[in-house]
Image: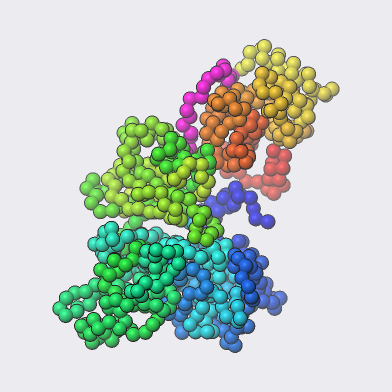
């Protein structure tokens, strides 16, 4: 059974600190260790079968008639992982629309160093073979090692999906299967964006260009990128109908291609810029100027013609850069770093990465048009060390939403974007979350042009030294999701999240302000609390959970909606455990006094925060109530509370509010005592079980 999500988050944070999840030390996907499983299979003399991605219809993602899963040794006599090296000409697309993925593989094969990061080359069907292979991908901030068995889906003895042109070569089919596993199924990689796979192959950054918008910029970056270790892809605009079909000029509408080269040729005394492009279908090519059989090749030198002209229907062709800009809608450049932008490998772009969440009612405020925009996660960016005249782009901001499993057409992607504001002087000293007033007085200096329904959006900017606020958001409020915000800069830049303390909108004060728990109570209150205790205590002057339940329901809720806010026994048992210092399952008089002071204080805060008098707190009201309780929390912790106690309605009852605030207060106290001021707690298994099971 996998660990709880909050535990997984802690583990991943620790992994990151310990260097696990880096390229040199990737994390085991689904906790499956390749070496352990391989050795186990060898010891037992069995062929590996992956129960986490089984050879059945669940891994395909839909029903297909006549599918039989076979190992390569059942398909050919002498299977090989690689035959005569790895090349973009090794494969063609199968019966699934993943040209975006295969175009990215085509680009990957052009960069041997990056290729070896993804595809461990020393794998084979000979020595030590036991039906298990592995590959590495970068997934949402960490590298993962993905193992698979080599059972592949076939119909009538032929592979259904990607196929090798050499019948006994299997690296393309196995790589595709591993990627299908991390995405959820083969069907999940039907349709997508080139940038997704390229990012997952490199762990780098990508730039998406639209050639028609700025041809000169696109030309300049293409020339620079082809001289560096960059993966480059491109895509044609969709046709008039959803079907992917070939246009009269030989290009395929709504299709992904690989850019495999940019070259300048001298043709009849004129310098011509040509782009070489690869179709992952392994066939179907451009029929215009400079195509394979074009007479224009007779206008270049014999050496150039011999070296670059290939009259072969292998899916690769040349075209002029002008035709390229005219016929392709987008160009994607993906690289490990942005040094190529400066034509200087020593240039240093510094990167900062931040994980965040949008939780409905807590940190999911929607776009700038929403009055809840301010509750979105906020990231304070301070740029130093640059001249005030910043004519060139010096900042890249990328926002990637985490969808751990893709779906067809990425239909579950949220519409996302980000906004950048300049921080006015009056907010320079503030370290907390900026309120609504900040956005009314601050200048918007950049951001995405519009919310986009994509896994990742990015933009480059020229920003002068100063302080800025980056706000990632969804288009609509109350949309749930996780994200990674990446900020890359040529200058010294510091980034922190504005969430250490919450800005509180003033709660309508309809009752007397609660007395601080540290303020001595008047004797009359003490006498009243004692009378309550004596009324419900047993013969030993103690109260158990059932007696606490009666006490709360009959006394705490006087004057409020009868019968709608009753406390259940389970909540009362939890409260007793939190306040029970003697571990007896009961509260004595002193413990009860502390308990009663707290619950009455939290009750008063609850009803002041419940401004609409609904008897429940909305998640925005919860934010105010928690802070009014004297607790300092981050946005992430507030998200956890909302998810844990909000229920399907997203509303927090009085019972839930008292339970969560009391728990947080007590757990904070436990940590302080056990850490002895060192900020770290070390527990033995027995100690951990005692605390977690009783509190």
- Whole-percent x, y for residue 344 in the image: 28, 63
Q: Main SS of the magenta segment?
A: loop
x then y, percent, for residue 144? 53, 63
User: In the picture provided, is 658 more to the left or to the right than 452?
Assistant: right
Instruction: Answer with the quarter of the image where residue 526 lies.
Output: top right
Q: Nearer the viewer, residue 396 or 285?
A: 285
Q: Which residues are magenta?
A: 495-519
Quarter location, residue 113: bottom left
Residue located 28% across and 58% down the image: 213
38 versus 420 height, above or below: below
Quadrant the C terminus occupies? top right
Numbered marks: total: 0
Q: Tell me the residue at 63%/83% (across/down).
A: 74
Task: Decide which of 398, 195 is in the foreground and name it.
Answer: 195
Q: Residue at x 24, y 86 (%)?
A: 303
Q: Is residue 113 visible?
A: no
**Horizontal side, residue 197 vs residue 390: left or right:** right
- Between 605 and 477, the residue placed more toward the observer is 477
Q: Is residue 500 magenta?
A: yes
| Residue 322 visible in the picture | yes
Taking the magenta stretch, the answer to whether it contains residue 39 is: no
The residue positioned farthest toward the top in the image shown: 524
Counting from the top left corner in percent of width and height, residue 330 is at 35, 62
Q: Nearer the viewer, residue 334 or 610?
A: 610
List the single residue furthest toward the left.
Answer: 269
Q: Quadrant of the N terminus?
A: bottom right
């Amino acid at each position: 059974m996998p660990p709880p999500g909050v535990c997984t988050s802690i583990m991943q944070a620790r992994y990151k600190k310990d260097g696990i999840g880096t390229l040199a030390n990737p994390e085991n996907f689904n906790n499956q260790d390749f070496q352990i499983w391989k050795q186990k299979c060898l010891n037992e003399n069995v062929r590996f079968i992956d129960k986490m991605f089984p050879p059945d219809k669940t891994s395909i993602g839909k029903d297909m008639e006549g599918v039989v899963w076979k190992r390569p040794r059942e398909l050919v006599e002498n299977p090989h992982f690689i035959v005569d090296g790895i090349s973009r000409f090794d494969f063609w697309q199968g019966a699934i629309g993943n040209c975006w993925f295969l175009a990215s593989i085509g680009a990957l094969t052009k960069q041997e160093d990056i290729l070896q990061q993804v595809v461990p080359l020393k794998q084979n069907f000979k020595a030590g073979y036991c039906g298990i292979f592995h590959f590495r991908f970068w997934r949402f901030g960490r590298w993962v090692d993905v193992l698979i068995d080599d059972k592949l889906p076939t119909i009538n003895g032929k592979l259904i999906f990607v196929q090798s042109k050499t019948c006994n070569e299997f690296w393309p089919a196995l790589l595709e299967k591993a990627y299908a596993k991390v995405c959820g199924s083969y069907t999940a990689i039907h349709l997508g964006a080139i940038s997704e796979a390229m990012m997952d192959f490199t762990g780098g950054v990508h730039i998406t260009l639209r050639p028609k918008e700025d041809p000169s910029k696109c030309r300049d970056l293409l020339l620079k990128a082809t001289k560096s270790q960059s993966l480059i892809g491109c895509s044609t605009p969709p046709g008039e109908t959803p079907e992917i079909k070939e246009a009269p000029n030989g290009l395929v509408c709504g299709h992904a291609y690989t850019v495999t080269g940019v070259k300048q040729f001298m043709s009849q005394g004129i310098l011509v810029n040509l782009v070489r492009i690869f179709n992952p279908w392994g066939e179907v090519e451009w029929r215009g100027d400079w195509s394979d059989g074009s007479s224009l090749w007779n206008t270049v030198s014999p050496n150039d013609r011999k070296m670059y002209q290939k009259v072969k229907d292998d899916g690769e062709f040349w075209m002029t850069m002008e035709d390229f800009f005219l016929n392709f809608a987008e160009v994607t450049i993906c690289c490990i770093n942005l040094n190529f932008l400066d034509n200087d490998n020593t240039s240093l772009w510094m990167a900062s990465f931040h994980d965040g969440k949008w939780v409905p009612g807590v940190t999911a405020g929607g776009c700038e048009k929403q009055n809840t925009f301010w509750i979105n996660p906020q990231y304070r960016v301070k740029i130093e060390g640059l001249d005030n005249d910043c004519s060139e782009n010096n900042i890249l901001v990328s926002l990637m939403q985490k969808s751990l499993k893709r779906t067809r057409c990425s239909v579950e992607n949220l519409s996302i974007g980000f906004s950048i504001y300049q921080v006015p002087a009056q907010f320079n000293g503030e370290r907390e979350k900026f309120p609504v007033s900040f956005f009314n007085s601050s200048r918007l200096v950049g951001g995405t042009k519009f919310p986009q329904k994509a896994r990742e959006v990015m933009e480059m900017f020229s920003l002068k030294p100063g302080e800025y606020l980056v706000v990632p958001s969804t288009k609509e409020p109350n949309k749930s999701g996780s994200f990674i915000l990446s900020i890359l800069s040529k200058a010294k830049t510091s980034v922190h999240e504005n969430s250490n303390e919450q800005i509180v909108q003033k709660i309508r004060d309809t009752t007397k302000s609660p007395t601080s728990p540290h303020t001595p109570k008047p004797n009359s209150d003490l006498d009243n609390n004692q009378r309550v205790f004596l009324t419900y205590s047993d013969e030993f002057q103690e109260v158990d959970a059932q007696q606490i339940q009666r006490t709360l329901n009959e006394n705490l809720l006087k004057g409020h909606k009868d019968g709608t806010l009753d406390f259940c026994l389970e909540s009362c048992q939890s409260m007793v455990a939190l306040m029970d210092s003697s571990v007896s399952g009961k509260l004595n008089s002193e413990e009860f006094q502390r308990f009663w002071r707290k619950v009455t204080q939290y009750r008063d805060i609850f009803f002041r925060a419940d401004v609409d008098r609904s008897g429940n707190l909305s998640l925005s009201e919860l934010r105010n109530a928690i802070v009014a309780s004297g607790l300092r929390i981050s946005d992430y912790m507030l998200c956890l509370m909302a998810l844990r106690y909000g229920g399907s309605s997203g509303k927090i009852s009085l019972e839930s509010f008292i339970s969560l605030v009391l728990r947080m207060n007590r757990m904070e106290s436990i940590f302080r005592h056990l850490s002895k001021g060192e900020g770290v707690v070390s527990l033995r298994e027995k100690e951990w079980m005692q605390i977690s099971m009783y509190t």
